[in-house]
Amino acid sequence: MKCLLALPLQNRYTNFNKKKGKVALITGGRSGIGQAIAARLQNKGASVITVQRGEDSNFDSIKADFSDPNVAEQLVTEVIKRKGQLDILINNAGMMTEAGIEAMTLEDWQKISM
């Protein structure tokens, strides 16, 4: 009997080799983990669009700020307008705060969770 935990991560959750012709939207794709995921998917044939607050990106990108609750719907509409489809969504955007968890305000939590 094989131990499921012993199987390689990419075989258990996603097969990065079957992405040709797929369209991926990656939030927080300008740097770090999001950029690495975008590069890997693009390398495997996916058409990648990243979403970030800043302008510069190594990929086709959309500038957006998730503090606006309507942004998600607008992003999907824009991706389908540009590419005709959306197959993969990677929710990677994040935010840091200087305050410790016990000092965070409701407004801080809302910014992080949007």
Image (cartoon, rainbow, N blue to C red):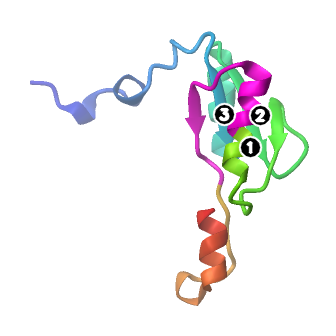
- Residue at left 65%, top 78%? 108
Q: Which residue is mark 1?
A: 74
* 73 shown above or below 114: above
Mark 2 vs mark 1, CA separation in Å: 6 Å
- Location of residue 22 in the rendering, given as x and y in whole percent from the top left corner: 61, 17
Quick one: SS at disc 1?
Answer: helix
Label 1: few (<14), some or many (≥20) within 10 Å?
A: few
Depth check, front residue: 28 or 75: 75
Q: Quadrant of residue 70?
A: bottom right
Q: State which mark lies toward you, 2 or 3.
A: 2
Q: Earlier in the sequence, mark 3 or mark 1?
A: 3
Q: Which residues are magenta?
A: 76-93
Quadrant in which the N terminus appears:
top left
- Location of residue 30 in the rendering, given as x and y in whole percent from the top left corner: 77, 42
The amino acid sitting under disc 2 is Glu
Depth check, front residue: 33 or 56: 56
Q: State which mark lies toward you, 3 or 1.
A: 1
The stretch drawn in magenta includes residue 4: no
Q: How many labels, in total?
A: 3
* 104 shown above or below 31: below
Depth check, front residue: 102 or 66: 66
Q: Which residue is mark 3?
A: 25
- Residue at left 51%, top 19%? 16
Label 2: few (<14), some or many (≥20) within 10 Å?
A: few
The stretch drawn in magenta includes residue 89: yes
- Location of residue 101 in the rendering, given as x and y in whole percent from the top left corner: 54, 81
Quick one: SS at disc 3?
Answer: strand
Q: Which residue is mark 2?
A: 78
Determine contact: label 2, label 1, CB under 8 Å. Answer: yes
